[in-house]
Amino acid sequence: MRVVITGGAGFIGSHLCERFLADGHEVVCMDNLLTGKVENIGHLFGKDGFTFVKQDITNFIHVPGPVDAVLHFASPASPVDYLRFPIQTLKVGSLGTHKVLGLAKDKGATVLLASTSEIYGDPLVHPQPESYWGNVSTTGPRSCYDEAKRFAEAMTMAYHRFHGLDTRIVRIFNTYGPRMRLADGRVVPAFLSQVLRGEPLTIYGDGSQTRSFCYVDDLVDGIVRLLGSNHTDPVNLGNPEEHTIKEFAEIVLKVFDSDVGMTFLPLPQDDPKVRKPDISQARALLDWNPKVGLEDGLRVTADYFRRELVR
Ligand code: UDP
């Protein structure tokens, strides 16, 4: 296959580029480098079948030659990033998705949209199945991301229904691993960089809010399976092992045998109180289950952050 990966220089995008190349496909990686980094794909330059195009996909996308699949992963994805870039976030989720769908229609390619657990908002149903419609603020600080992704799902389904485009939608729950930015503000890089620097872990609120953390290799495996399926309705991918943020901090302290302790800071507005994927669809349709345990995944991720801190 020849695949276009938007956001290919980002955290998840760069792992996808690597995986598709390793599986023998050609990869056209597109990124405007707003939150992505060339360092994430530096090792891929010069490999057979890899091309990088610096492109803002909210403008017309031109790709010469055939394309079999477009994986749309371009977007700021950490709450800190999308608060810094709210308009870019809305534009890439709306205009960018429209351009991606137009490219795929022109090429007769399959589109896989990276959606998110954020479309469930501050959920009133727990755990969250794909059938849940969500509880989302249209105007709050997270709305630029949540509503852009909800629009992106609607636009993708409209292209599927109206133009007969072959589409997939993955709803990604909290994912972590190497190539997250040390300072992207999300809880895994925050706690790991704090423990490595010998600073206390910053817990927002009382730490009773919950999240469920999936290692990036597991996620990528699920995405490859979803693309290869014929399932056009959204599918949740994430690790259903749920922890409160305070429990998660305790796990980090234990794994790294650290006594830096914790400090409690105000909870950001509209921070979801619970989050845990119902992955029965992914299990049944894709025969997918996350395999990497939290402690193992955290150790590998910390090795990466250690190298980044030295650099
Ligand atoms: N969080 C925290 N300390 C930090 C960063 C985040 O307690 O230094 C909390 C945050 O308030 C949220 C959870 O950890 O409840 C996960 O936050 P993250 O930004 O990773 O992603 P989210 O799941 O909110 O999109």
Image (tube, rainbow, N blue to C red):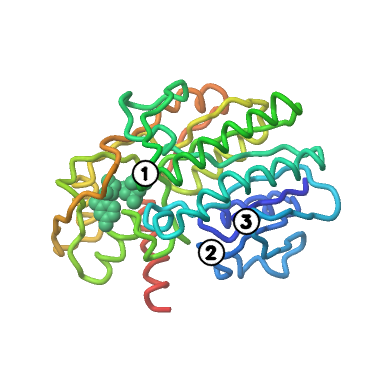
Closest to the observer, 278 or 301: 278
Residue lying furthest front in this view? 139
| Separation (CA) of disc 3 from disc 1 | 22 Å
Report helix, strand or loop for mark 1: loop
Q: Secondary structure at mark 3?
A: helix
N-terminal of the pair, mark 3 or mark 2, is: 3
The residue drawn where x is 73% and y is 61% is 50
**Which callout, 2 or 1, points at the residue further toward the start of the chain?**
2
Q: Which residue is mark 2?
A: 34
Q: CA distance from mark 2 to mark 1?
A: 25 Å
Give the amino acid type for the residue marked by disc 3 in the picture: Glu
Direction from residue 191 to residue 234 in the image, left or right: right
309 or 168: nearer the eye?
168
- Identify residue for label 3: 18
The image shows a total of numbered marks equal to 3
From the viewer's perspective, is the residue at label 3 or at label 2 nearer?
2
For label 2, the SS is loop
Q: Which residue is mark 1?
A: 213
Image-based side of 177 in relation to 71, left or right: left
**Nearer mark to the viewer, of 2 and 1:** 2
Q: Position of residue 168 (x, y in %)?
A: 63, 33
In this rendered view, identify the residue nearer to me: 299 or 116.
Answer: 116
- Estimate how packed mark 2 is, as few (under 14), some (14 to 19) or many (20 or more) residues with alpha carbons within 10 Å: some
Label 3, ligand 1: CB separation under 8 Å = no
